[in-house]
Image (cartoon, rainbow, N blue to C red):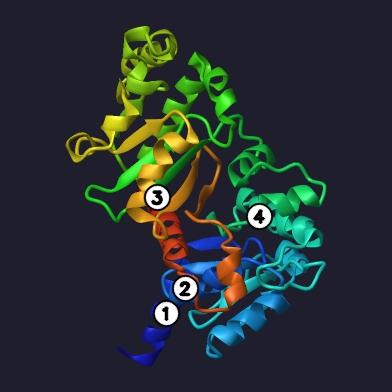
Amino acid sequence: MPEQFASNANAAVVRRRPILAVTCGEPAGIGPEVSIRAAWERRAEINSVLIGDAAFLAMIAAEIDPKIRLVALSQQALRNNGLPNFGLDQVAVIDCQLEAHVQPGKLDARNGRPVLRTLDLAIDCALQGIFDGIVTAPLQKSTINDAGVPFTGHTEYLAERSATPQVVMMLATDRTTPPLRVALATTHLALKDVAAAINFDSLSRSIDILHADLQKKFGLKQPRILVTGLNPHAGEGGYLGREEIDIITPVLDAAKARGIAVSGPYPADTLFQQKYLAEADCVLAMYHDQGLPVLKYASFGHGINITLGLPFIRTSVDHGTALDLAAAGLGHADHGSMLAALDAAAQMVQAGRQGKA
């Protein structure tokens, strides 16, 4: 290929790459390391823009591999001029400075608000169309709360900051055949509060959001959704609870009338078998620890977390801050889940582009 055409082709590849904001999470955990490793490894396919303390990230990058090239950009420059067209041999960093020195494995509440500011910046820029999506590394909820900011998790915060009335949390993995997706009707609630949170309107909206985003972001024309019951044995005909009779079944009947391929409610303890999952695109579980243990057992470290219903794409890793691994030094953390989160977000961007074509 002549040199001038090769140069033009390379520029076209750079422009086509999905632009994903990557918030690096709790600085004392493994988030910065897995973010840098994954962003660098996928730099040819994905324009990952790290958001965090530029000097701190540069120090980690140099220890991981001196060949890693990070290019710092100030928040003001981003807001004034937008995101430059970075090449394939570098990764951009939007500088969000920390307030306290980082000791791996040791939490410091002084860094709680700066960590939250990385998320704020990513959300604002995604809403403005600067980023095609957001990928989040794990953060420490306790550090943000200790900094004086009430915080229950990424999912709830993203919904609040984007003025989204309701979102659906879904974890997914392609390490199973077929790929396993588990969505949740409720998220980070105490178990004693779950039953009261499941009502006709909320569950109906969850199913509508799940159906719409499986179509839009995953390219599934008629997604098939299996729904668990809330109680053991799906209520045992009312003897172990009436939520299946009074709420879940009427919701499913109404969803079917709207043309949604949904079925259930099924006992959660027997639903996760190949003979059922082979006929499904997603399982909707009623609460956090009802559905997620199955998925994490099948794919921990390589699964992803997806927030559905937002006005932008958001994926995340399936693990926490792993302070113990961070304290042990670089090289102990597996960045497989971050790679999967980047790949999934990029695939959703592509599905969205094809849908608009």
Crowdedness of circle 2 by 10 Å Cα count: few (<14), some, many (20+)?
A: many
Q: Is residue 28 depicted above or below 170 in this figure?
A: below
Relative to 88, 103 lies left or right: right
Q: Nearer the viewer, mark 3 or mark 2?
A: 3
Residue 14's mark?
2
Q: Can you identify the residue that label 1 sits on?
A: 10
Are the residues flagged by discs 1 and 2 in contact, CB closer than 8 Å? yes
State the separation of the CA atoms marked 3 and 4: 19 Å
State the separation of the CA atoms marked 3 and 1: 39 Å
Crowdedness of circle 1 by 10 Å Cα count: few (<14), some, many (20+)?
A: some
Are the residues flagged by discs 3 and 1 in contact, CB closer than 8 Å? no
State the separation of the CA atoms marked 4 and 2: 34 Å
Residue closer to the observer: 144 or 216: 144
Of marks 3 and 4, which one's residue comes earlier in the chain?
4
At mark 1, the secondary structure is: helix
Are the residues flagged by discs 4 and 2 in contact, CB closer than 8 Å? no
| Whole-percent x, y for residue 74 in the image | 74, 71
Of marks 3 and 1, which one's residue comes earlier in the chain?
1
Let me know if residue 116 appears in the view. yes
Q: Can you identify the residue that label 3 sits on?
A: 296
Are the residues flagged by discs 3 and 2 in contact, CB closer than 8 Å? no
Q: Amino acid at mark 1?
A: Asn
State the separation of the CA atoms marked 1 and 2: 6 Å
Q: Nearer the viewer, mark 1 or mark 4?
A: 4
Q: Amino acid at mark 2?
A: Val
Q: Can you identify the residue that label 4 sits on?
A: 140
State the separation of the CA atoms marked 3 and 2: 35 Å
Q: Nearer the viewer, mark 4 or mark 2?
A: 4
Q: Is residue 250 depicted above or below 276 in this figure?
A: above
At mark 2, the secondary structure is: helix
At mark 4, the secondary structure is: loop
